[in-house]
Image: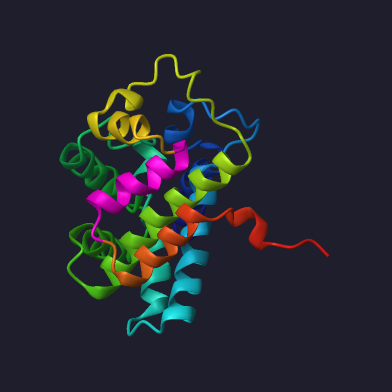
């Protein structure tokens, strides 16, 4: 029954509205209302539009937007895990199983399954671009939280992430919380020149000030 299929998928995909990004919980971000997975998805899509606009990428933007719309689909079933909480390979394994279940109601589910597999494989220019948007968005959100003083590095009880060798080394060098976050990603993720420039600009500047209220 098509009506049931539509509503079943919609209700499932409504869950990310109330699913808080676990990385912010891990770091005890003190803002009363933290970013949800759904808000992260929206922001990655807006970031893709801006990066495509300003740097003239030769790729299928509509395909990228679709990829980003469903790139967290498994979290509707398994929840949100950071790389520090669950091994990436294991997360992808159980994530793909969850995706198959999530897309089961849709008659064209195989199209979306293929799109997610393409995103995860990161072998096409659209998948690589979408992946960079996903990672950059997280860095930029961390920067905004830091600028608003929502993170206290002296109040990190039960935070296992801060014990990571790379994280602790960067903080020991005197970087702020968000600078550590950005620097860590710049060191381990193969951002292209344009994404690197945007992240480095955020690293050096107070980005909330870029929006001037009338």
Q: Quadrant of residue 124?
A: bottom left
**173 in relation to 28, above or below:** below
Residue 77 drawn at (x, y percent): 37, 38
Figure colour scheme: rainbow
Judge from the rendering whether residue 36 lies leftward or rightward of residue 94; answer left or right.
right
Residue 12 drawn at (x, y percent): 46, 45
**Can residue 41 be seen by looking at this rendering?**
no
Q: For the magenta stretch, what is the residue range?
A: 176-190
Q: Main secondary structure of the magenta part?
A: helix
**Quadrant for the C terminus in the image:** bottom right
**Relative to the observer, which residue lies in front, 3 or 157?**
157
**Relative to the observer, which residue lies in front, 144 or 83?**
144
**Relative to the observer, which residue lies in front, 169 or 193?**
169
**Quadrant for the N terminus in the image:** bottom left
**Residue positioned 40% across, 84% down in the render:** 56
Residue farthest along the top direction in this orientation: 157
**Relative to the observer, which residue lies in front, 6 or 196?**
196
Q: Is residue 63 magenta?
A: no
**Residue positioned 18% across, 60% down in the render:** 121
Q: Quadrant of residue 123?
A: bottom left
Residue 95 drawn at (x, y percent): 26, 43
């Amino acid at each position: 029954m098509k009506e049931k299929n539509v509503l079943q998928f919609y209700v499932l995909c409504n869950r990310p509205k109330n699913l808080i990004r676990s990385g912010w919980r891990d770091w005890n971000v003190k803002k009363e209302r933290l970013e949800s997975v759904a808000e992260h998805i929206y922001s990655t899509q807006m970031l893709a539009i801006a990066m495509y606009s300003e740097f003239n990428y030769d790729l299928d933007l509509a395909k990228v937007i679709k990829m980003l719309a469903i790139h967290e689909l498994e979290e509707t079933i398994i929840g949100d895990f950071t790389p520090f909480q669950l091994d990436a390979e294991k997360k992808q394994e159980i994530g793909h199983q969850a995706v198959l279940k999530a897309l089961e109601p849709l008659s064209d589910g195989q199209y979306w399954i293929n799109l997610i597999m393409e995103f995860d494989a990161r072998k096409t220019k659209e998948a690589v671009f979408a992946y960079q948007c996903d990672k950059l968005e997280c860095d930029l959100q961390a920067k905004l939280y830091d600028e608003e003083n929502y993170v206290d590095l002296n109040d990190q009880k039960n935070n296992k992430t801060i014990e990571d060798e790379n994280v602790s080394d960067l903080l020991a060098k005197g970087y702020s919380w968000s600078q550590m976050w950005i620097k860590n990603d710049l060191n381990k993720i193969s951002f292209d020149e344009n994404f690197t420039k945007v992240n480095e600009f955020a690293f050096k500047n107070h980005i909330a000030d870029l929006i001037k209220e009338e």
